[in-house]
């Protein structure tokens, strides 16, 4: 039985991934902002003692640090961590820390999750971190890491959201060599377009909302993509960005070290 952490497990791809992991007999640790839904899989897993749920707001530094400390204390060993939680909003929003929310949740929070839970991962068997990115990152045509915490312009999906996912894949790539000695592997994965609450929200351009019923899949498909990246085809090199299951060149790779320095500074770490 593996012990696996899934953030964002209360809906969408995260929920489907949690259900698949539970169905395979693994112990799942969840970190969600809202309570887990009362679906049969959750109820049964709780009765078997195979599910440990924690609540915390990844947009709030104090809330996420408190929740992660609880997880680290209760689960000194984690085999795999899936950073699934993310946001895509229809208008600019700033967090309590004074940073743009897409950067805070989509770029910085996954780094904080790894930083706080790294000792648990080091004791695990698989030692794998899977960051959920997006092929929207491939659409970015200009990139300055310095503006990520406070972008001057806003566009739905292809603005701060796409930038935040590009930055996520970049720091994942830059961090990989540093973690070689610990045997922790880090990859970022695009789960593809899925029918989730986020892709039905006001963060989506109107024309994509129109195409969503035709082109977007059930979130089980995205969950399967993440599952395969972690368990079925675990040969991707550390630092890789997987799109449709294959390593894909990351735009602006020459800025990766700058992004890593930025998130380390924002997270209050000195690096490893």
Image (cartoon, helix red, strand yellow):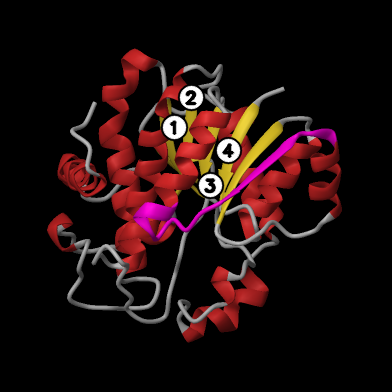
Q: Quadrant for the N terminus, please.
A: top right
Q: Residue furthest top?
A: 181
Q: Earlier in the sequence, mark 2 or mark 3?
A: 2
The residue labelled by disc 4 is 5
The residue labelled by disc 2 is 120
Badge 2 density bin: few <14, some 14–19, many ≥20, Cα 10 Å: many
Q: Are marks 4 and 1 in contact (CB under 8 Å)?
A: yes
73, above or below 19, in the image: above
Place residue 218 in its image quadrant: bottom right
The percent coordinates of residue 92 (x first, y second) are 32, 78
Q: What secondary structure is found at the residue carrying circle 2?
A: helix
The percent coordinates of residue 192 (x first, y second) are 55, 56
Point out the stretch of residues depicted in magenta: 48-63
Q: CA distance from mark 4 to mark 3?
A: 23 Å
- Residue at the spot 22% in from the left edge and 43% down from the top edge: 268
133, above or below 123, in the image: below
């Amino acid at each position: 039985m593996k012990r696996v952490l899934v953030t964002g497990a209360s809906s969408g791809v995260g929920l489907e991934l949690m259900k698949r992991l539970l169905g395979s007999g693994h112990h799942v640790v969840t970190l969600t902002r809202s309570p887990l839904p009362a679906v049969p899989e959750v109820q049964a897993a709780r009765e078997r003692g195979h599910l440990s749920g924690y609540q915390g707001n990844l947009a709030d530094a104090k809330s996420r640090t408190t929740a992660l400390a609880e997880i680290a204390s209760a689960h000194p060993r984690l085999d795999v961590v899936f950073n699934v939680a993310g946001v895509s909003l229809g208008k600019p929003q700033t967090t309590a820390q004074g940073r743009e929310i897409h950067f805070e949740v989509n770029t910085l929070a996954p780094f904080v999750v790894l930083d706080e839970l790294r000792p648990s991962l080091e004791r695990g068997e698989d030692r794998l971190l899977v960051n959920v990115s997006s092929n929207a990152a491939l659409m970015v045509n200009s990139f300055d890491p310095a503006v990520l915490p406070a972008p001057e312009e806003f566009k739905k999906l292809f603005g701060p959201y796409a930038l935040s996912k590009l930055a996520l894949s970049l720091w994942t790539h830059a961090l990989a060599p540093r973690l070689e000695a610990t045997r922790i592997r880090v990859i970022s994965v695009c789960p593809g377009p899925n029918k989730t609450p986020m892709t039905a929200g006001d963060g989506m351009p109107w024309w994509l909302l129109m195409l969503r019923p035709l082109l977007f899949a059930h979130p089980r498909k995205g969950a399967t993509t993440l599952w395969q990246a972690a368990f079925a085809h675990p040969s991707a090199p550390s630092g890789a960005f997987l799109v449709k299951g294959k390593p894909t060149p990351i735009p602006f790779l020459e800025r990766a070290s700058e992004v890593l320095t930025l998130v380390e500074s924002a997270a209050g770490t000195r690096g490893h």
